Amino acid sequence: MPILFKDRIKKELKLEKITNPNRLKYSYNLTFDDDTNIDTTNSSNYTISDGYLTLTSGFDTGILQTDAKEHPLSSDITKVELKYAGSNDGHVNF
């Protein structure tokens, strides 16, 4: 029974649309379809598969650092919004 619930939750999370409700400019979405935007030198103990980021088997912690993004304007950044969707995320630190 738990496997059925887990499969259903995974399917429902994939249906969620990524939105920008506060209309922030220059948004950046990381969807974990591949690792092209990840700084693999400074990241460890993670696996990306089928759109999911998970810890590598046998590890309790992991680090994922994205590549640096250039700010396109000369003004300061005044507002940042971080959103994520997932499950079993009780120990996520940003």
Image (cartoon, rainbow, N blue to C red):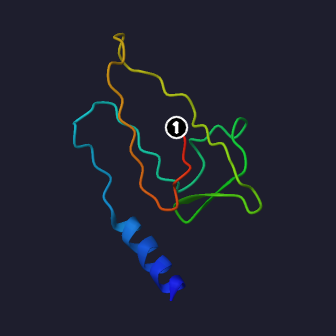
Residue, x 35% and y 15% (percent of image)?
73
Look at the picture and state if 16 lies above or below 20.
Answer: below
Q: Quadrant of residue 77?
A: top left
Q: Position of residue 6 (x, y in %)?
A: 49, 77
Lateral position of residue 24 relative to residue 53, left or right: left
In this rendered view, identify the residue nearer to me: 86 or 15.
86
As drawn, the residue found furthest toward the front would be: 90
Q: Residues within 10 Å of mark 1 (few under 14, many from 20)?
A: few
The residue that label 1 is drawn on is 94
Residue, x 48% and y 85% (percent of image)?
4
The amino acid type found where label 1 is placed reads: Phe
Residue, x 62% and y 42% (percent of image)?
64
Q: Position of residue 28 (x, y in %)?
A: 40, 38
As drawn, the residue found furthest toward the top would be: 74
As drawn, the residue found furthest toward the bottom would be: 1
Residue, x 56% and y 50% (percent of image)?
91
Lateral position of residue 94 relative to residue 83, left or right: right
Numbered disc 1: secondary structure:
loop
Q: Position of residue 72 (x, y in %)?
A: 38, 20
Q: Quadrant of residue 50?
A: bottom right
Look at the picture and state if 79 lies above or below 91.
Answer: above
Q: Position of residue 10 (x, y in %)?
A: 46, 71
Q: Quadrant of residue 9?
A: bottom left
In this rendered view, identify the residue nearer to me: 90 or 69.
90
As drawn, the residue found furthest toward the right would be: 58
